Image (tube, grey):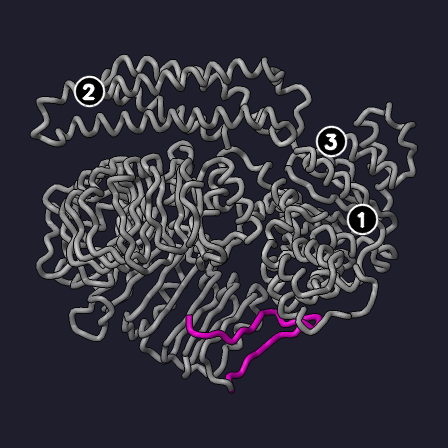
């Protein structure tokens, strides 16, 4: 983290010195000196951070550099604030004292700089004083405890527990893939977060009698973070060929590889590579495993999805899931009995208390086994178990398997740019479902996301989130029908790791009811998860303030928070947002979702750095025109909770605005020289009396050639009235980036195929009142992957999907429609994977054309007739698609 913090501050200093050159000339020279020293220290930080877990001296040295970087960050931000105040001519009646004010400020800053310089000199001297000059010598990738854990896992125990709870289906599925399937050599990857049981599952398969009968030879090697190709090859040679290790130590790697390849060339083999971390590890070892098309297999366990796909893109990885409550309790109680070496003797009170303990494990088998082992060594009395419940997090750190150490290996392996992003998840409440859009915008506002060529920062942030999910450190709670992440969550134990490391790095602090504020005086970010805080300590250095689910009135003096970058007040009752909001010139993110605001001060126009303004579901009477002055604004979400008529003033440009949602147009709206000047939009959501502005709306959309998502909703859901008609649809043929369209309102006639966006992948229709079957047109869209036909989008009786139609469609949803017949001709919907039908009560029979759709994996039905007939093709005793009765979506 220190490496990232220093890099972040160096970028800020560079920007400050360029933008504010000459504002405080003498100060600038000293800031340049600090920058040069931090750059020199940065060269050592990466190696120092790797080594700090095993050396307290290095850890303290890294912390000193981090604190210097933080203080420098404060200095630069205060200087920027001062310059901004001077330029705005604040306190007009004191202007005659501006020179004196500046002199006093210079003196104060110089004093602060002198302190920083002395600390830098002390840190430089301490490297030699404490003998940490040559950090590269002897540097290890993991801590001492990590080495100990690796050694423990490297010695493969031959006994595996008979009661493999929650893995029965996984064993059956993987056994089939190992023994049956293609004759080619295939790699079967088992992926999932640390502690899910990947290694346990692999051991159960490896020791199976059926496996031993099927393969000529088998070998198990543990790879780990401390991977050394030669050691792995020597281990394989010893286990497969019985080579004497001392005898082959002098053989070079190439000859050793050749010997293994020759030995395996005429055998059907099974190799287990346990805990592989990098693509390069697989590249090094792959030549040893010949492809003889005899059904040989390689089992690979990893935390990283990209490593699994890289090893064999043709075989999908097998992803392990967390245990549900019943399975968790079953594992817990059986492990207790195993530890006690007896049958179940749990007292009556133990189940209720034990289930509370197990609940805290969040379905993670490793944590459950650790706590079961802990309790097995204690007296079976209520008070002892109660103590464990009250200190579960602490107990898991002290347990013999060292849960936190195992999880921390994943954190240590993160590249520096992902570490603050991951730790930031600790700000969110326990079991909180985090909006992916909200999270990525917060990362951008915090400055965590690094530029990557011409790519948008928001797109880079989304890749960051996908990478954390691919590393099994974050769970994808929901995905959109297009496959993009909609919401995510973090396991409680990973969240605990985030919180402990976040506090250690002074990155943030989480406040609950009753927390003493004295302990958080150095925190850079605050998350208030419960309780009404009274900020009595100095909060001038706080960068982020986030409230979660309070839904009560909280007094908030914004004058105290001078350096805020993020202010998220979701759900709070704020009678009046103070005009002091305009003084927060560093603010990048202002979240006011579901707040109760009576007014919105015009001083918001002073927020020259604001990137995101989120007013969704906010009760507010009016929006000040000053919003349209925010030149750095990138994302603007208006509230549709109250139909706020929003009209930008004359010649509003907002060159950086990419997202504009919830903009309401009515008879009094002015389009000319207003919104039509906003021509760099990527996402646009319009609603209201759009038919009154048909020509202006069409022209505006035509000018926005960068549009990627467009939602048009006529007359705010009242689709049965005359003015609910969507304006005459224009041609979108020139919108090559537009991939998502949503039309809500009466459409007189469907677009011709030539007028659709050429790269459209997602289309949603609602209240369209189409009388003619739209399928003959829609099925010709070459790139369409998602189609949703919602309530009243089609009023006809029959839908026909003709042969060859919808070649790329993967997700199809019908909801609240009245059609009775659906025909699917041979060759239609050839790539369909998910089909969802909700309350289409007149459709009695799923068409016969579904039977040949071998790509279909999931069929969801909501509020459909119980006597509905299905045609299900049976293949080896298993349904070829999954049928679920679901509630309304």
Q: Residues within 10 Å of mark 3 (few under 14, many from 20)?
A: few
The residue indicated by pointer 2 is: 102
The residue indicated by pointer 3 is: 228
User: Which quadrant is the C terminus positioned in?
Assistant: bottom left
Where residue 39 appears, as percent x and y from the top left, is 46, 18
The residue indicated by pointer 1 is: 270
| Stretch of the chain drawn in magenta | 867-889
Where residue 438 appears, as percent x and y from the top left, is 38, 50
Instruction: Tell me the element at label 1.
Output: strand
User: Is any atom of residue 858 visible in this view?
Assistant: yes
Q: Is residue 878 magenta?
A: yes
How far is disc 1 from disc 2 in space, using C-alphas? 75 Å
Q: Tell me the mark number nearer the camera, choosing from 1 and 2.
A: 2
Name above or below for residue 215 compared with residue 120. below
How far is disc 2 from disc 3 in space, using C-alphas? 60 Å
Q: In the rendered structure, which disc, 1 or 3, sits on the residue that comes first in sequence?
A: 3
Please tell me whether the stretch drawn in magenta is mainly helix, strand or loop. Answer: loop
Name above or below for residue 282 compared with residue 846. above
Asked which quadrant contains residue 59, the reply is: top right
């Amino acid at each position: 983290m220190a490496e990232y913090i220093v890099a972040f501050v160096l970028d800020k200093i560079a920007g400050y010195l360029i933008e504010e050159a000459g504002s405080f000339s003498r100060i600038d020279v000293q800031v340049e000196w600090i920058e040069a020293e931090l750059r020199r220290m940065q060269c050592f930080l990466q190696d120092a951070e790797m080594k700090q877990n095993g050396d307290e001296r290095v850890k303290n040295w890294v912390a000193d550099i981090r604190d210097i970087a933080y203080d420098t960050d404060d200095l630069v931000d205060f200087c920027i604030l001062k310059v901004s105040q001077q330029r705005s001519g604040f306190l007009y009646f004191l202007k005659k004292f501006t020179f004196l004010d500046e002199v006093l400020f210079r003196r104060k800053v110089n004093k602060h700089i002198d302190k920083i310089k002395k600390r830098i000199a002390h840190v430089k001297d301490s490297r030699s004083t404490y003998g940490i000059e040559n950090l590269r010598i002897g540097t290890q990738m993991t801590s001492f405890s990590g080495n100990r854990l690796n050694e423990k896992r490297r010695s493969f125990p031959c006994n595996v527990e008979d009661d493999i709870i929650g893995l029965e289906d996984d064993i059956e599925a993987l056994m089939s893939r190992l023994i049956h399937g293609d004759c080619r050599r295939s790699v079967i990857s088992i992926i999932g977060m640390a502690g899910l049981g990947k290694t346990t599952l692999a051991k159960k398969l490896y020791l199976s009698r059926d496996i031993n009968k099927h393969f000529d030879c088998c070998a198990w090697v543990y790879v780990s973070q401390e991977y050394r190709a030669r050691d792995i090859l020597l281990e394989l040679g010893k286990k497969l060929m019985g080579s004497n290790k001392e005898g082959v130590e002098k053989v070079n790697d190439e000859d050793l590889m050749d010997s293994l390849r020759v030995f395996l060339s005429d055998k059907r083999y099974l190799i287990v590579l346990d805990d592989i971390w990098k693509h390069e590890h697989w590249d090094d070892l792959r030549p040893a495993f010949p492809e003889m098309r005899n059904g040989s297999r390689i089992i690979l366990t990893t935390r990283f999805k990209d490593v699994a796909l890289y090893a064999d893109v043709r075989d999908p990885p097998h992803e392990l899931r967390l245990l549900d409550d019943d399975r968790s309790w079953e594992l817990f109680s059986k492990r207790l009995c195993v530890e006690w070496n007896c049958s179940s003797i749990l007292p009556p009170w133990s189940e209720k208390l034990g289930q509370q303990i197990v609940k805290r494990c969040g379905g993670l088998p490793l944590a459950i086994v650790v706590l079961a082992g802990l309790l097995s060594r204690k007296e079976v009395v209520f008070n002892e178990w109660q103590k464990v419940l009250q200190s579960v997090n602490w107990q898991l750190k002290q347990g013999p398997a060292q849960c936190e150490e195992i999880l921390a290996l994943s954190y240590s392996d993160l590249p520096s740019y992902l570490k603050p992003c991951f730790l930031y998840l600790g700000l969110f409440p326990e079991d909180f479902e985090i909006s992916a859009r909200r999270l990525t915008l917060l990362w951008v506002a915090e400055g965590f996301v690094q530029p990557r060529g011409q790519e948008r920062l928001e797109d880079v942030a989304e890749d960051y989130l996908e990478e954390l999910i691919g590393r099994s450190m974050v769970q994808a709670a929901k995905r959109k029908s297009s496959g993009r992440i909609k919401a995510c969550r973090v396991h409680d134990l990973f969240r605990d790791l985030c919180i402990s490391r976040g506090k250690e790095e002074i990155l943030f602090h989480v406040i609950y009811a009753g927390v003493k504020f004295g302990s958080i005086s150095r925190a850079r970010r605050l998350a208030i998860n419960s309780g009404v805080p009274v900020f009595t300590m100095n909060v001038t250095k706080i960068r982020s303030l986030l409230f979660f689910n309070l839904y009560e009135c909280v007094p908030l003096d914004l004058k105290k928070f001078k350096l805020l970058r993020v202010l998220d007040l979701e759900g709070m009752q704020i009678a009046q947002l103070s005009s002091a909001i305009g003084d927060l010139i560093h603010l990048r993110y202002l979240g006011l979702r579901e707040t109760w605001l009576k007014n919105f001060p015009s001083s918001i126009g002073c927020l020259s750095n604001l990137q995101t303004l989120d007013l969704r579901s906010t009760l507010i009477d009016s929006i000040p025109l000053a919003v349209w002055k925010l030149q750095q604004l990138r994302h603007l979400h208006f509230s549709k909770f109250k139909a706020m008529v929003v009209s930008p003033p004359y010649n509003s440009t907002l060159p950086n605005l990419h997202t504009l949602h919830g903009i309401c147009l009515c008879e009094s709206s002015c389009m000319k020289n207003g919104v039509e000047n906003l021509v760099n939009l990527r996402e646009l959501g319009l609603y209201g009396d759009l038919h009154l502005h048909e020509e202006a709306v069409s022209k505006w959309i035509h000018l926005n050639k960068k549009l990627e998502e467009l939602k048009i909703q006529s007359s705010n859901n009242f689709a049965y009235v005359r003015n609910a008609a969507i304006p005459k649809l224009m041609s979108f043929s020139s919108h090559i980036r537009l991939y998502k369209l949503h039309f809500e309102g009466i459409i007189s006639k469907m677009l011709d195929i030539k007028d659709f966006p050429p790269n459209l992948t997602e289309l949603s229709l609602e209240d369209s009142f189409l009388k003619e079957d739209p399928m003959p047109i829609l099925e010709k869209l070459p790139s369409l992957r998602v189609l949703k036909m919602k309530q009243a989008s089609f009023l006809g009786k029959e839908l026909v999907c003709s042969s060859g139609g919808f070649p790329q469609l993967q997700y199809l949803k019908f909801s609240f429609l009245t059609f009775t017949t659906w025909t699917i001709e041979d060759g239609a919907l050839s790539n369909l994977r998910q089909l969802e039908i909700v309350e289409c009560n007149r459709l009695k029979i799923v068409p016969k054309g579904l039977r040949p759709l071998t790509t279909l994996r999931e069929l969801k039905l909501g509020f459909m007739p119980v006597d509905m007939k299905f045609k299900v093709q049976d293949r080896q005793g298993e349904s070829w698609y999954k049928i679920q009765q679901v509630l309304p979506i």
